[in-house]
Amino acid sequence: MRKFIAIVLTALIIHSVNAKSLTSLFIEAESFQNKGGWVVDQQFMDLMGSSYLMAHGLGTPVSDATTTVNFAKTGEYTVFVRTYNWTSPWTTKEGPGRFQLTVNGRALNNKILGTKSNTWEWQEVGKVKINSKTVTIGLRDLTGFNGRCDAIYFTMDNVLPPNEPEALTAFRKEKLGLPEVVPNAGKFDFVVVGGGVAGTAAALTAARQGLKVALIQDRPVLGGNNSSEVRVHLGGRINLDPYPKLGDVVNEIAPLRGGNAQPGDYYEDEKKLEMVNAENNISLFLNFRAFKVEKEGTTIRTVFAKHIETAEELSFSAPLFADCTGDGTIGYLAGADFAMGRESKAEFNEATAPEEADKMTMGSSVQWYSKEGDKSSDFPEFNYGIDFNETNAQKVTMGEWTWETGMNFDQISDFERVRDYGMLVVYSNWSYLKNKSSFKEEYKNKYLDWVAYIAGKRESRRLIGDMVLTEQDITDFVIYPDASAPTSWTIDLHYPDPKNTKHFPGAEFKSIAVHKTIHPYPIPYRCFYSRNVDNLFMAGRNISVTHVALGTVRVMRTTGMMGEVVGMAATVAAKNKTNPRGVYQKHLDKLQRLMTVGAGKYNIENIQNYNLGGTLGPKKINLQIPPYDKD
Amino acid sequence: MTKTKLAILIFFSSLFSGGYNYSPGDSFKTAFPSEDFLNMKGIAVSHVIKNSSDSLSDNKIVELQDENGLTIWFGRYFYKDICITGICRMVKLWIFWDGVGNYLGIQLDEKEPLTKSDHTPFEPQDYIRLDEILGDTVSILKELQYEDLVIEDGPQPNIDDIPEKDLFEVDGYSSATLPSLKEYVIKDAVFTCYTLWHTVYGETKVDIDDILKGRIDSNYLNKLLNGSENQKLFALEMIRQNSSFFFEFNSQLLPLIASQNKNISEKALSVVTPQYLSNSENQLRFIELMDHSLPETKYEIIYKLQLIDNISTDAIILLIDKYATGKISAGGLNQIFKIISKQIVTNKNILNNNEIESRLVQLSKHSDPYTANLTKNFLKSTR
């Protein structure tokens, strides 16, 4: 990995903290030098304009976040903070995410923030006299219940910053002094956006074949749903026919131990990171989130990404891009055709599809677990609109994939609400167990040890490729000439748990899975590139499949192998100066050769024996693959 | 076993000419799997169960032992009416468990085949399915009540009354659904499947376990450890439950960790105690097992060491050498560093040990950049 990145980032941080004009000072909360116990949440920056700081203390106030800023002028300022009450969708009560703004360690006007408003907005904190040009600003959490702050604005002009999204974006850019011309991040053959298992595997594979790759990931760690931030274990099988070498790269980055919602160590973030760092051909851009593309005709020329802490922007130009964002963000921004929700039975004649198309998707999981302490511990009363009682309380000590929310909401435009509901039910249920239940004695010593704040999303946009994989392609075992990465997991579709529906109709937070077992099936390569954006690959859950077919392909050993295929196809495209479709039309034999040889490097034993999933077992694949040798 | 047992040693051939109306040999043709259990050679022992609440027709567990006193099988003769809505069918058969109490098979008289609710006899494939069902230790039948078994044309139970884990399938693991019960059991023989499954895993199984546990001593464990896979596993479980045996048998146990049989290897690992691993010599012995173990066992050895508070410098050196010589693959280096990190918390001088330091410096210059970078970052994080 190139070393210049760290130098660039340091410069950016200094720049953002000092963003000021003569009579005002704008501070992005996420750019604070010392985050204390607050976390940076970037998941909704496309919705509300920025990443933000959040006091994720599981009911215990977190330590202050602080930063030192320089004012151009001393004097009296009016102060605004952008925040809101995150529980407002479910209650009219004042919210639980209470916090204060501090100036040189003192709470400003003792004003409690985070309790009001049902949408992100600027709220006045009051006036403050700034006597010294160098001041320490802080956020003081009062509850540990996810108070959140986007930005802080000091102004002598007493002008409220804009709330309207576009105006606010322009305001941020101006106040932060970001350059009009976005700096270019370097020269690349292939830009992979999204550093989950699919994107990481795509970048590693392409880099090992000689491409100069940029890998852009909007978190500080790689792995996505399989990182220590989300903690979903890998699923599915690797090293299957017709290309048994596919999966070798996945095996190299794969955690050795399985289990959902296990201690963070299990997910081996450092292994994924160092596998990427070991490739000189990869430039890794952690903490950058893509937010804009520029096209020429139907070809993407540039992707723009913003740092999730400093808001600084970089541009990435290349002949080829891969959308491994999960949400199909790059495709969406580029105008790629996409689907979302369930197709009707009539559309593809799928046995499992509903009669009528609808917007239902699988949900997102906020996983959590508790631990047994040596002594009794308290948990605050927490009731913000979802009532728990003896009949509906979940008498459990952890929640893994079945704690799934938002199936009837938009997994992109409603995603903050979807994630927040996941946290709300965890806290509400836990509060009931600890404080009111008839079995609270059993919970006396138990305490919440981990609750995810990065939600594990299963489904949103599916970008449409030259082929859309359907249920019957898989169940009828229709083998196409461009057969590639195998999917082996069951067709595993999630629905609201009927028991949960009974107690929480329309507000379910538990799910059930319905499985249809399959023979391992090689996905056609044509599902891995956009049909109307010429140079866009995709790997991960945003590939070209129906909702039903997504049920099997979405597990992460499988998405990782998609990444390997896309990395190989990008190599073929780059070397033959063509695009993804050109690989299918004219160079499929070259892709087959690479898939036969594989992209493994370290000869690591395959001990990926956990969470393989049920299967009907291998079925003979009739496919003409030339007998390639490794050379 | 709370009931009084009476063990009688008798010769095999005389056992079945007694009160069962069967004689060994021609009568018993139908056995699943295909073993003819009742004609096996050995020494028969009968255990009389008193005060049995299991309404079986016979109150004895019969045991067949080999010449070393190890159990070949336990058997119980079962004859009972299985009744549905007042209509009863007599079921007669032997059920067998192996020498450590696992389900082994069934055997019955060809003249008295099992029949279904429509009075047709079981087909050969029905017996095979029954054998599979009885071998399924986590069968969906386990949590069901007799009343739940009306799966066609009857009222469905209240959804709240069904255990959640039986309600639907979950990622990666199959559990039960009521609709799937009829796919699982033998058609028209639901009650037979249910009754026999609960017999295999019911009171008799508990009694067999008690008989076996009552025999546990050094001599018996020694025999078991030299026995079949299941006997080894059973012995290991007994030792795990009573760690005082561990020190007596550790020289026999440790090689089992390097077994190519994953079940034995896993079970043997579970027996190793933290006390044993707190000794530096034992740590070296334990690490050396990696050379011949299954790949996944190597990592289990590392995970076990990650839990130990005092890993010796010699053990750390040996682990690094295992990595450097390829005995541990690239996927394990970060796990070795986790062991070292834990030790540094209590012993900051570990990295000042010349032998450890020189090895780590070498790794940080490794030709493979993954190894080099990971080591460099590790060294940086410790300073």
Image (cartoon, helix red, strand yellow):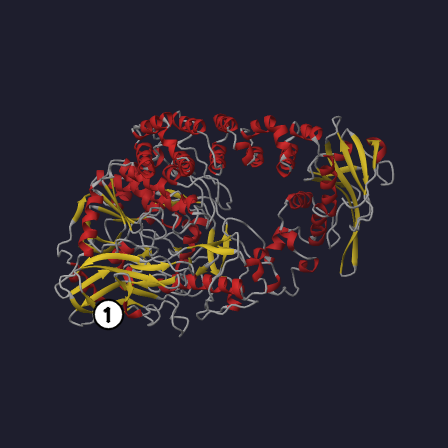
From the image, tell me which residue sits under label 1: A163
Query: Of all residues shown, which one is farthest toward the bottom?
Result: A92
In the rendering, at what x and y percent does residue B7 appear?
A: 82, 36
For residue B349, side relative to residue A513 (left or right): left
Judge left or right: residue A582 versus residue A356: left
Position of residue A301 relative to residue A132, above or below, is above
Query: Measured along the vertical axis of the image, is residue B165 above or below residue A264?
Result: below
Which quarter of the rendered picture does the N terminus of chain A lie within?
Answer: top left
Q: Is residue A42 above or below residue A593?
A: below
Residue A503, placed above or below residue B7: below
How busy is the neighbourhood of tag 1: few (under 14 within 10 Å), some, or many (20 plus)? some
Q: Residue at x 77, y 29 (%)?
A: B42
- Element on which disc 1 rests: loop
Query: x%, y% of residue A128?
Result: 22, 69
User: In the orientation shown, which residue stands out farthest toward the front?
Assistant: A131
Residue B215, quarter of picture: top right
Residue A440 seen in render = yes
Could you tell me which quadrant the C terminus of chain A lies in?
A: top left
Q: Give the camera-side residue of B220 and B233.
A: B220
Q: Nearer the viewer, residue B365 or A542?
A: B365
The type of residue carrying mark 1 is Asn
Percent x, y of residue A44 = 31, 60
Identify the image quadrant of residue A361.
Answer: bottom left
Residue placed at 40% from the left, 64% from the top?
A357
For residue B227, what is the image quadrant? top right
Label 1 chain ID: A
Counting every numbered tag in the picture gives 1
Q: State the image coordinates of residue B381 (x, y, percent, origin top left).
A: 33, 39
Does residue A410 appear anywhere in the picture?
no
